[in-house]
Amino acid sequence: MPLFLALYNGGRSRMGQAMASVSSCMEALRDRGQCALIPFITAGDPNLETTAAALQVLDRSGADLIELGVPYSDPLADGPVIQAAATRALQQGTRLESVLEMLKTVSPQLQAPIVLFTYYNPILNRGFERFFQEIAAAGARGLVVPDLPLEEIEPLSKAATTAGIEVILLVAPTTPKERIALIAERSQGFIYLVSVTGVTGMRTQIESRVQELLTDLRSVTDKPIGVGFGISQPGQARQVMQWGADAVIVGSAFVKRLSEGTPQQGLQSIESFCRSLKTAILD
């Protein structure tokens, strides 16, 4: 075992502590008046061994939930940083099966619920029942499918519920208000509010329209709302929290840091960054 992995495996052990559901985690944070921090990383970049170590690092550095991206060959919702990470992971042979094998090994050591991020086609090809049984057995608690049409959610949602997986739906800035209400009704765990029109990526500022979108969502639901796409700095995370978000979701900034330098340097970088984001959203 490489020294860097042994080092991070030697941290706080959470064996025996059951990983909470997405809903119960969000509800507990809301009851305490706290905003959730949800980092995103791409599985298999730079390799699955580092991914396993990164999950442990994030779990003990302030992450309340962790979004784990399954690399996909045609990631329509992802910007250049995450696309490049997915390409590197695929080139190394990372597939859903190997991601789940890794997750099954590391999930008993995690307290933060794991939310898988994957596209619809791999789920469809695998079959709903088998897919959800396998990801639940690996330790996942939630799922985000960015290209899942609302009109096709019923059979997927039914299989997910049977397996104990919560399906989190996305609301975009261009989503009509009447459709927002339908999405909010069907989303489980929390509602994923996309802060920009476009793909993921790091922005220098968060669009002020996010505050308006949060207000629109609050008018139709009391479910927790997480804001993602574009948040890359502690100040931006704090701004989104002050606008009323229940969670801030940060992806490209973590993926970029984890990919730079050696695996050990990447792990150290995401640890300090995670702590800085958590500090920014604590009152």
Image (spheres, helix red, strand yellow):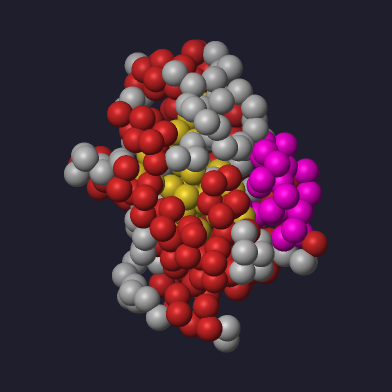
Task: Indicate the quadrant containing the C terminus: top left, top right, bottom left or bottom right.
Answer: top left
Q: Residue at x 42, y 34 (%)?
A: 236
Relative image position of residue 44 (x, y in whole percent): 66, 63
Report the side of 163 relative to 155 (left or right).
left
Q: Which residue is at the front of the view, 275 or 163?
A: 275
Q: Residue at x 57, y 37 (%)?
A: 202
Asked which quadrant contains residue 27, the reply is top left
Q: Which residues are magenta?
A: 69-90
Relative image position of residue 107 (x, y in whole percent): 47, 68
Q: Residue at x 41, y 15 (%)?
A: 212
Relative image position of residue 102 (x, y in whole percent): 59, 71
Task: Indicate the quadrant containing the N terminus: top left, top right, bottom left or bottom right.
Answer: bottom right
| Residue that protrudes farthest toward the bottom in the picture | 1
Residue 104 shows in the view: no
Within the magenta stretch, is there residue 59? no
Q: Is residue 145 above or below residue 266?
A: above
Report the side of 73 relative to 264 (left or right).
right
Report the side of 32 relative to 117 (left or right).
left
Q: Is residue 13 above or below residue 247?
A: below
Q: Residue at x 77, y 66 (%)?
A: 93
Report the side of 225 relative to 161 (left or right).
left
Residue 53 shows in the view: yes
Within the magenta stretch, is there residue 87? yes
